[in-house]
Amino acid sequence: MRRIYAEMARLADAGQPFALGMITAVKGSSPQRAGAKAVFLPDGRIVGTLGGGCLEAEVQARALRSLRTGQPDTFDMVLDHDFGWDDGLICGGRVFGVILPQAGQYGALWKELAETAGPVRWGVREDFTMGRVDEPGGIWLYQETVRPPFALWIAGSGHVAQAVAPLALQLDFSVTVFDDRPGLANHQLFPQAVALQVGPWHELLNYPLPPVPAFGLIVTRGHQHDALVLSEWIHRPFAFLGMIGSRRKARLIREQFLRQKLATPEQLERVVCPVGLAIHAVGVHEIAVSVLAQFIQRRAEVLGLAKKPDSTEFVPASQI
């Protein structure tokens, strides 16, 4: 979400005209939920998506017209056979939205939303002006809250971390990689936007969690380092804590932690191991997809957007 605000801020700074199309409400089935956004440029480029297909094509046509006239627009579309039947659009739902051709005038707002360190509620008024909701004046047609990205801490900088980190950035996580190997934990192997913490593990494990929901991923170079990181991170209030490995590894670490009184059974139940959705992933990039899919699922639960599924967490020894 923050990426589209950053792109709008960049376009506004460059003086590039664009229209913001946004779904403000849905009824029934639809390809996107309320809050979905797309930026439409005069040359036909689109940043973001309203769900694709003929819905997006129709909104794009209206957005280009709004850019020419300078007049904002609204849309109310029923997604059935009568709308774009040539393409077979049969979602059956109904979407409402706005098209805002003057969005480029709000560069300061987009920059604030892209960089906010805390929740900011903004919206669109009935006269199609935009601003923070705490600003006086007008009746709000649409409102939403923008929050800073969830933090993702990755312990280890090997192949899996190198595949997960750039994808996590694209999915609006703020990524920090921890390792004691400067030969791997560097910006030749990780994007500049990834924060790197390099040093002895006894120092790295003392870093305090940021004041936002945080996910932890343990993918160090071996069982001993994984166990070392887990022995500290298991006591932190992570919104999600996962560790790579097999069910056998999960059983052995569980037995070790209980025997040495490093964690309680309740704490161990919070650890997801093996981490990642069971999609039969092969290779680091497929593993990264399985892990990030699980992160997206959990993030939606934390935000109240999805019901928590049946647990796939640290497998109890009795079940192995």
Image: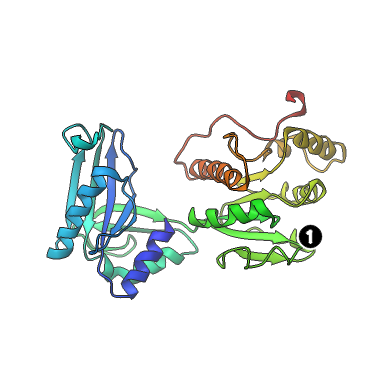
Residue 189 seen in the figure: yes
Q: Is residue 120 left or right of residue 54?
A: right
What residue do we see at 64% from left, 48% from top?
238
How many other residues sit within 10 Å of disc 1, few (<14), some (14-19) or many (≥20)?
Answer: some
Residue 191 on image: x %, y %: 57, 64
Residue assigned mark 1: 201
Farthest front residue in view: 283
Seen as rendered, the residue at the extreme left is 69
Percent x, y for residue 226? 76, 48
Residue 234, how many percent across, how many down?
72, 46
Identify the colour scheme used: rainbow
Q: Quadrant of residue 45?
A: bottom left
Q: Nearer the viewer, residue 276 or 310?
A: 276
Count of labels in the image: 1
Residue furthest bottom in the image: 14
- Residue 128 quadrant: bottom left
Q: Tag 1: residue type?
A: Trp
Q: Is residue 221 left or right of residue 129?
A: right
Q: Residue at x 46, y 66 (%)?
A: 115
Q: Quadrant of the N terminus?
A: bottom left
Describe the element under mark 1 as helix, strand or loop: helix
- Dividing the picture into quarters, in which one does residue 100 lie? bottom left
Residue name at image x 18 percent, y 53 percent: 61
Which residue is found at the position 28% from the left and 43% from the top?
Answer: 53
Residue 82 percent location from the top left of the image: 16, 33
Whether residue 70 appears in this view of the structure is no
The vertical placement of 320 against 214, above or below, is above
The quadrant of the picture occupied by the C terminus is top right
